[in-house]
Amino acid sequence: MTQWHGKTKGADETYTDEEIQARLTAELPHWYLEDGWIRRKYKTSGWKATLMVVNTVGHLAEAAWHHPDLAVSYAFVIVKLVNHNAKGVTEKDFALAKKIEEVVQWQPGKDAGAVLEGTPNDDPRFKYLKYDG
């Protein structure tokens, strides 16, 4: 059960479009609602990075037993989430979106005392993801 603005929702209860939009604005500002799905477009530096994003999303989704639709191209991945059984967006979609966002947007070198420095963005051979911040 999840509390959202005083309302308690079970894991498979769907949210209204207004509730979805409010949660996206508050919790997942790079995600958007379109045609009943919550979506996010990840821009990459090319095919290698695109495949890494796809594999990351695939691992997280399979571990969560929740299966997104993906649109994959050379330099981007669009992740689309909806709870197929509930026929709408549920807490499961928000939870998976947050986990995907956390892992895909993680940037080495941003952690205090980080020894994992990350790939050099100034060298196109190693450029990876186009981070949001």
Image (tube, rainbow, N blue to C red):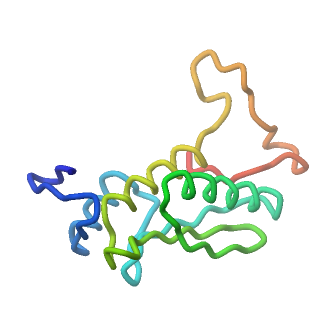
On screen, residue 24 versus residue 46, left or right, reads left
Residue 95, given in percent of the width and then of the height, sits at 39, 52
Residue 15, given in percent of the width and then of the height, sits at 24, 69
> Which residue of the protein is positioned furthest toward the right in this rendering?
125
Instruction: Give me the residue at 55% from left, 68% from top.
Output: 79
Which quadrant, please, contains the C terminus?
top right
Residue 24, given in percent of the width and then of the height, sits at 34, 60
Instruction: Give me the residue at 80% from left, 48% from top.
Output: 127
> Which residue of the protein is positioned furthest toward the top in this rendering?
113
Of residues 21 and 90, which is closer to you in this image?
Answer: 90
**Res 35 → quadrant:** bottom left
On screen, residue 13 versus residue 124, left or right, reads left
Q: Name above or below for residue 31 compared with residue 132.
A: below
Q: Name above or below for residue 105 compared with residue 118.
A: below
Instruction: Give me the residue at 45% from left, 55% from top.
Output: 96
Of residues 8 and 16, which is closer to you in this image?
Answer: 8
On screen, residue 87 versus residue 54, left or right, reads left
Of residues 5 and 109, which is closer to you in this image?
Answer: 5
On screen, residue 126 versus residue 102, left or right, reads right
Number of marks in the rendered image: 0
Residue 9, given in percent of the width and then of the height, sits at 18, 58
